[in-house]
Amino acid sequence: MTTSSLPQPQLRASADEAPETRQQQRTPAANPPQRRWHWSWKQVWFQLHWFIGITAGTVLVIIGLSGATLAFKDELLDVMNPGVRHVALETRAPLTPGQLSNIAAAEHGQRVASITMYAEAGAAPRLFFAPKNGQRRGESIYVHPYTGATQPALTGAGFFEWTESLHRWLLLPRDPGRQVAGALALCLLGLALSGLYLRWPRRPLDWRTWLTFDPALKGRSFLWNLHAVAGTWCLVVYVALTLTGIYWSYDVVRDNIDAWAGKPPRMAQAPGKKGQSKEKKEAPAVDISLAWSSFQQHAPGWTLASVRLPTRAGEAVQFTWLASDAPHERARSRMSIAAVDGAVTENEPYSQQALGARLVNIIYPLHMGTYFGLPGRIIVTLASLGLPLFAITGWMLYLGRRKAKRAVQAQRAMLGAGAPGQANTGLPTLVAYASQSGQAERLALESARALQQAGVAVDVQSLDQFDPAQLRQYERALIVASTFGEGEAPDGTRRFARLLQATSGTPLAGLEFGMLALGDRHYSAFCGFGHALAQQLQALGATPLFPLIEVDKHDPAALADWSTALARCSGSAIDAIGVQEEASYAEWRLARRVLLNPGSQGGELHEITLTGPAGASWEAGALAEIIPCNADGSDGDAGNAHHAPRSYSIASLPSDGELQLLVRQERHAGEENQGHGLGSGWLTRFAPLDAAIRLRLQANPAFAPALVDVPCIYIGNGSGLAGLRSHLRARQRAGLARNWLLFGERQQAFDSVCGAELQGWLDAGHLARLDRVFSRDGANAGKREYVQDRLRANAGTLRDWLAQGAIVYVCGSLQGMAAGIDAVLQEMLGQEGLDALLAAGRYRRDVY
């Protein structure tokens, strides 16, 4: 819905358009007593995602970094220990496992339990000695393949053992450490899946929405986009890592999976002291030369073979080996060969093993990434290194949200603290505000705090709940007033303005006042309400402390004048008021546009769909402020009023995965932009698909959604359906069905905007009542009916709904429709009743 495309004169609120948090923007009119927290499932998951992320996510950084360190452990050890695990090639044949075993046993005085042999020439075999009493596993050494001499100990091996202990059980005792690591794995799985749910777009088949990152973004949008897109890239890897990690963390999981796979149960630990093994008698040396020769004949193409030596006479030699064409490093075949004659007693190639056993053997390669070779290892390493990225960006986003939330809370809290070391004297100074969307309130609070620090007693009031007679209680008033529409008072302040206008005489002769009027100079009634309020105060006898100060949007020079005026009033220095970092415009993309009313007598109405930064969030009723371009795509003159940002009601919700607008194409005489309005022409015609659209989200608390079980009446016309549609979608997803929609357009045949969606809501019971009014369809009968006429004709129903506590929402044109609705309500309720409806926050308007 366009709000400022020229030359149309009807405009949205001309001030209070600062990008603030919801806590900063709450006004009485936007926060009625019946409003309470109502969290959707998405909000619940959002809170869980953040809570787990800033707690367990910090520890997961340790697991990620240690896992990345271990991914290329063997390569790093070879670089650190040249000539240890690989020796220079020689012409003589390498020694057999039996020869190597005999040499090592004689040199070290220990029994060799197993030997790992490598087919690669020059690779040093690794020997494992039988564990000594009190040991869980025996020592291991590398030996020279041609001489049998013991190779030097590996430099850095201790560091990698420590890193593995850190990764697998966080340096805790083994069993509790495994369970803690398993819990962290479950947390990572929850973060990955909840992140997927939270960013699920409305068009999930659009790969760019999922995987593309925009480096041109800044601030919070940059962090969100980086966090979400990188998380999507790593999602599959994290799911694989966590599920495989859980297998080793919990015995109950591992035992059940092994039992399903047909693997023999693991040996229970013998009673006694932990880490001790039962003492065994030394077995006599067994000649395994025949078994080795037989293995080489029956296992052509082997690359690695683990040879387990017999522990007593008559036992077979056990071979576990890897073929050159094995699909992964754990795809190992098994063979048993009698030592006495070299006969094969058992041969179980990997391809013939049970399917369950083969699936279990995939767990380790998947966890390490080796299942997919070198690319898989690189991917797992990068994903592991990504965990610090998610922790850092998550913390930055969390702290940013906390900082913004505390800002207004702290400002309000400090108002009661006074200025240390200074005594407040005299009657308090009234600091009052008239605000539509929160900017006037923020400036008033900041001003009050500055005065209080200067030793001035203050009383902060919203004019929404204020009576003009109360002004007599003060000697001095400082007022921050925004302007709504064409010089009107903000909705909540209309009662105060009417009562003040009706006051006669000079009852305020003893009052001094200062006025800060907020506005936007490209609107025709710039700061109109501030001027009207100041004039009426003077007519009632009040004296201005200084000339009225006009603020064009966030003009720093005007705000500096206000700070100077406050300093003169207080007699002390005042820090600059209104210094803030404005929300940057993020870059969104034009995904598609659809003409909704082909053949209509009115201007073309388009549904504009934009995709933007991951994690972008808004609530129903919010606005999108867009900087348009000229027809040729140029920026134009930023100082020109025709190039000012345009605000549009958002017609979708974040859970839709897209930001949608309903934009009426404006036409005017002249050659500029080929006769099109700047904003509407850019969005509906000239911007190519996938064009960059500079946009920032703007809260609109005066049009806040009602997600509690009260009736709601939604009234609008034309592109005003945009703001109403987002409200109705929010109500539908909250399971709230007491909704009445009155919507007006020209002709049913051409202007049934979103007709299928509206009818579907009615059929499903989400709409209790739907009134669609088409003014031109009755023209032939000599009578045109408009939305306000339909509402007046159903006055009885309207009274019933209002008696049940209904909230009235109006979105659309200020002149005509909105003014007509205002008149109907005033006829029914009287001025006092209408003022009460406004004061209770039950009459909410977003008109232009």
Image (cartoon, rainbow, N blue to C red):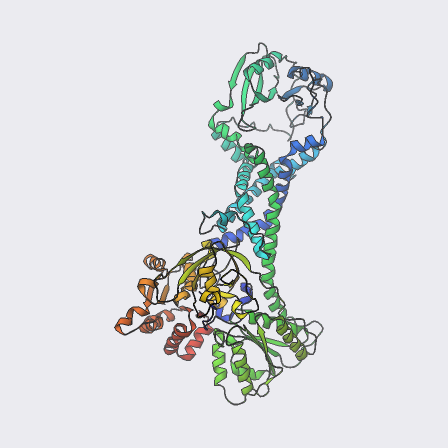
Q: Give percent across and percent down for residue 805.
A: 40, 69
Residue found at x 49% / y 84%: 501
| Above or below for 321 versus 7 | above
Residue 678 in view? yes
Along the line of sight, which residue is nearer the eye, 674 or 610?
Answer: 674
Q: Residue furthest top?
A: 341
Q: Quadrant of residue 781?
A: bottom left
Q: Quadrant of residue 844?
A: bottom left
Residue 40 in the image: state x and y as whole percent: 46, 56
Left or right of residue 51: residue 5: left
Quadrant for the N terminus in the image: bottom left
Residue 482 higher or lower than 258, as above or below: below
Q: Nearer the viewer, residue 58 or 218?
A: 218
Relative to 378, residue 43 above or below: below
Query: Which quadrant of the figure contains the C terminus?
Result: bottom left
Residue 758 x, y percent position in the rendering = 35, 60
Q: Residue furthest front?
A: 671
Q: Nearer the viewer, residue 147 or 28?
A: 147
Seen in the picture, residue 322 relative to 823 is either above or below; the reply is: above
